[in-house]
Amino acid sequence: MVVRWLVSGVVLAGLAWLGPASAQAEDIAYREPSASRIVLDLSRRQIRVLRQGQMLGPWPVAIGDPSTPTPLGEFQILTKTANPVYVSHTSGQRKELVGPSSPIGDRYLAFHRNGRGEFGIHGTPWPHWVQIRAAVSLGCVRMLNAHVRQLFEAVDVGTTLEIRG
């Protein structure tokens, strides 16, 4: 079975060159540290937000299968999408799913793109995998829908995500 997915609202376009002054201002704005920091501990399979000396969470997560692991390192939240569209082509038919019963839930936070695709933190209609903190995804981080909504509201695009082993 081949499943292809698309998250609506994800834009894969380069920045337009606007000249030295605006490029420099944008670069500086991009580098400014966020007031919040997300920390994902793969060994504990939990995620939390550190914000102004306080902690939100920790919340349990399901992570990437050993053959398709969640990447380690420091990333930034690239996009945030409420009610992302999941597109499936199972049985040769196109089917769009939206909302909490979709395979990616109703909140999606993209954090990394590479040759394997895009990695995100998202909800799930299968809470069992999160509750047992399974390693079952293709590298994405699955959270309970209620928890990913809290995370979604607590952070902005550009927030640092630290993924530890």
Image (cartoon, grey):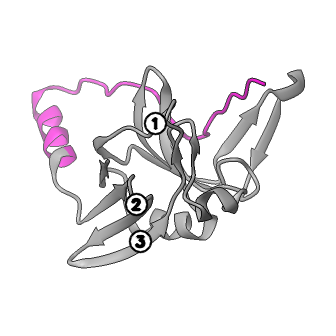
The disc at residue 77 is: none
Precedes in sequence: disc 2 or disc 1: 2
Q: Mark 3 — residue?
A: 58
Q: Secondary structure at mark 1?
A: loop
> CA separation, marks 3 and 1?
21 Å
Q: x%, y% of residue 47?
A: 41, 62
Q: Are marks 3 and 1 in contact (CB under 8 Å)?
A: no
Q: Mark 1 — residue?
A: 69
In the rendered structure, the answer to whether residue 88 lies left or right of residue 111 reads right
> CA separation, marks 3 and 2?
10 Å
Q: Is residue 12 above or below residue 78?
A: above
Q: x%, y% of residue 45?
A: 44, 58
Q: Are marks 3 and 2 in contact (CB under 8 Å)?
A: yes
The disc at residue 44 is: 2
In the rendered structure, the answer to whether residue 34 lies left or right of residue 8 reads left
Residue shown at the point (24%, 23%) measured from the top left: 17
Mark 3 or 1: the one toward you: 1
In the rendered structure, the answer to whether residue 112 lies left or right of residue 129 reads left
Residue shown at the point (18%, 48%) measured from the top left: 29
Which secondary structure class fits the magenta region best? loop
Q: Which residues are magenta?
A: 1-30
Q: Per the image, is 39 magenta?
A: no
Quadrant in which residue 113 is drawn: top left
| Residue density around tag 2, few if under 14, some if 14–19, many if 20 or more, within 10 Å | few
Q: Is residue 108 visible?
A: no
